[in-house]
Amino acid sequence: MHTNPFEGAMEQLTAASRILEARTRTKREKESLKRIIDILRYPERAVTVHIPVRMDNGETRIFEGYRVQHNNVRGPYKGGTRYHPSVTLDEVKALAFWMVMKLAVVNVRFGGGKGGIIVDPRTLSEHELEALTRGYARAIAPVIGPTVDIPGPDVNTNETIMYWMADEYRKLKSQISMSKKERETLPAVTTGKPLAHGGSEGRHTATAQGALYVFEKLTKKLGIKQGATVAIQGFGNAGYFMAKNLVSAGYRVVAVSDSRGAVYVHDGIDPEATMRCKTEKGTVAGCYCKGSVCDVRFGRTIDPQELLTLPVDVLIPAALEQAIMEKNADRIRAKVVFELANGPTTPEADEILRRKHVTVVPDILTNAGGVTVSYFEWKQNMDGAHWPESVVFEKLRSVMTAACDDVWNTAERYHTSIRMGAFIVALSRIVSAYTKTTD
């Protein structure tokens, strides 16, 4: 069983490369493919930094952080930055690799990177959080930039943190001679910023919005009917907005969970009332919210692990990696697993679900809406433009539905899973990019 997410990611790469190799005709093409796969097994750069922060009590704490740049053959590195006590270098390496694949699936001309700091941000004051963020920005400043590597938000990071990072980078760069164009594009060093500081319309809901376009595109193909039942593990930004989207579209979200608890409401939750209740309580546990009213008669508290095994039509893991593993995959009763988190299903669990005829719609397709709109933000910053939300979502729908078609058609052509279809689409585009650099 893989407990190392990077090893699991490399197993996915191996599986997809074998399928591609079997269809590769000439010896030269096989050797070229093998060379590129070997390159993709290693990040191009992995930076470890240590950030001293003077705490409010006068003590100095040292925090460890990372920035991994996996591959940039298709463009500048791009990827989020997470603040979490369980962050590890191998986790960040896996996330950076998946970002390479994800951006190639949606055909956005970026490479993949990722960052993280080992910290529980809930234990820090705002002053301490800002000091940590600015310290991290200074530490990684030599390896990032608007045309080099563009960090964005991820777990436990938000638009304020992205602004602090961009502002600290701007202060550092203002000390050196730059052209007018270079100064104008400095805000493009991060994405996910507030609107007042170069952020994009629609970025806050982009991950869920992109996932909705994928969901809508695949419902007929997957046999998901109106009124289908859904359970969502994770009620943060992506999980909450996905719940809102699905309820508005006529689906029944019967269970949600967070890191502290879970609830089941047979008739379906009210996402907005549940979020208000969660904000007040600090957890969704006890938030039996139906029709904007929260009442114990509507539902019951369940164990977060029980949510994964409910007899629903669709299970959406929207929290952290490795939620579905070998030890619990056989108990999954959903017909479809729609991955909204990064890497929520291990390779061993994937195989168990395949044997159970559970369809898995993979993360490198379903949650690519966030990074796609991050690309739109970067593009607006580089061009000095600002698009209305309607334009952002129109462009996002076009990207996500095209990616759906590419992945589905590839999976059918290769007689393989949707996940392997997505990896084959990504690898084909990466191979093409390497071929162009050597022609």
Image (cartoon, rainbow, N blue to C red):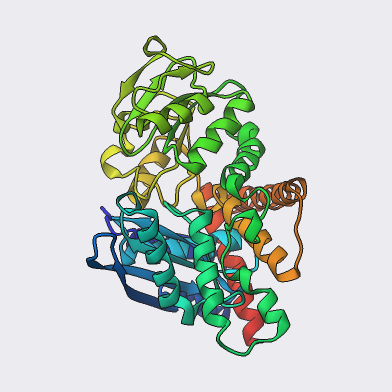
- Nearest the viewer among 258 and 131 is 131
Taking 222 as reference, is 133 above or below it?
below
View extreme (bottom): residue: 177
Tell me where residue 128 sits by quadrant. Answer: bottom left
Residue 406 percent across, percent down from the top left: 66, 53
Could one spot residue 326 in this view of the protein?
yes
What residue is drawn where x is 43% and y is 52%?
A: 155
Q: Quadrant of the C terminus?
A: bottom right
Would you say 180 lies left or right of 297 here?
Answer: right
Is 16 or 227 nearer to us in this picture?
227
Tally of numbered tags: 0
**Nearer-the-camera pick, 239 or 8:** 239
Q: As drawn, which residue projects farthest toward the top?
A: 297
Q: Quadrant of residue 295?
A: top left
Is residue 266 shown above or below 230? above
**Place of residue 90 in the rendered image (x, y in percent of width and height, measured from the top left):** 33, 65
Residue at 61 percent of width and 47 percent of height: 206
Frontmost residue, 24 versus 381:
381
Q: Is residue 21 visible?
A: no
Residue found at x 28% / y 28%: 303
Q: Residue at x 28, y 63 (%)?
A: 55
Point out residue 331 in the picture as x, y percentages from the top left corner.
31, 32
**Residue 108 spot, x, y in % from top left:** 65, 63
Describe residue 260's horizontal placement relative to residue 411 as left or right. left
